[in-house]
Amino acid sequence: MKKPYRNSGFSLVELIVVIAIMAVLVGVLAPQFIKFVEKSRMSADIQNIETLCHTVETFAADVDRHRITIPHECQIDLFPAVNIL
């Protein structure tokens, strides 16, 4: 007669090794992920400002150019406080 197979699962050492590997990966990848999120937010902000600028130009063209004075071309120069490269 065969003995029934007993599945005891993972040992405590195996679980600790897996958790340690995951912690190292998170520690290495988290700063990169945060950097990309900041770049994405900056790009979205720049796009929103450009859209607002074009909207004001369109409004000025629709109403009366003589009553509303805006620069001919909207130029946006943003210098972030933190250099994100």
Image (spheres, rainbow, N blue to C red):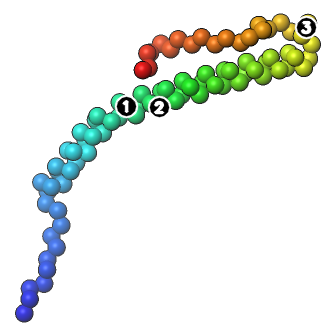
x and y percentages locating residue 30 in the rendered image: 35, 34
Q: Residue type at mark 2: give it.
A: Val
Residue density around tag 1, few if under 14, some if 14–19, many if 20 or more, within 10 Å = few
Q: Residue type at mark 3: give it.
A: Arg
Residue density around tag 2, few if under 14, some if 14–19, many if 20 or more, within 10 Å = few
Indicate the secondary structure of the residue bearing disc 1. Answer: helix
Which badge, 1 or 2, is on the more N-terminal residue?
1
Residue 63 found in image quarter: top right
* On-image quarter of the N terminus: bottom left
Which badge, 3 or 1, is on the more N-terminal residue?
1
Indicate the secondary structure of the residue bearing disc 3. Answer: loop
Report how far apart the C-alphas of labels 1 and 2 lie in the structure.
Answer: 9 Å
Residue at point 74% right, 11% down? 73
Taking the view exactly as shown, the residue that stands out farthest to the bottom is 1
x and y percentages locating residue 78 in the rendered image: 57, 13
Report how far apart the C-alphas of labels 3 and 1 lie in the structure.
Answer: 49 Å
In the picture of the structure, the residue carrying the numbered disc 3 is 67
In the picture of the structure, the residue carrying the numbered disc 2 is 37
In the picture of the structure, the residue carrying the numbered disc 1 is 32
Check residue 53 in the rendering and tell me which mark sits there, or answer none: none
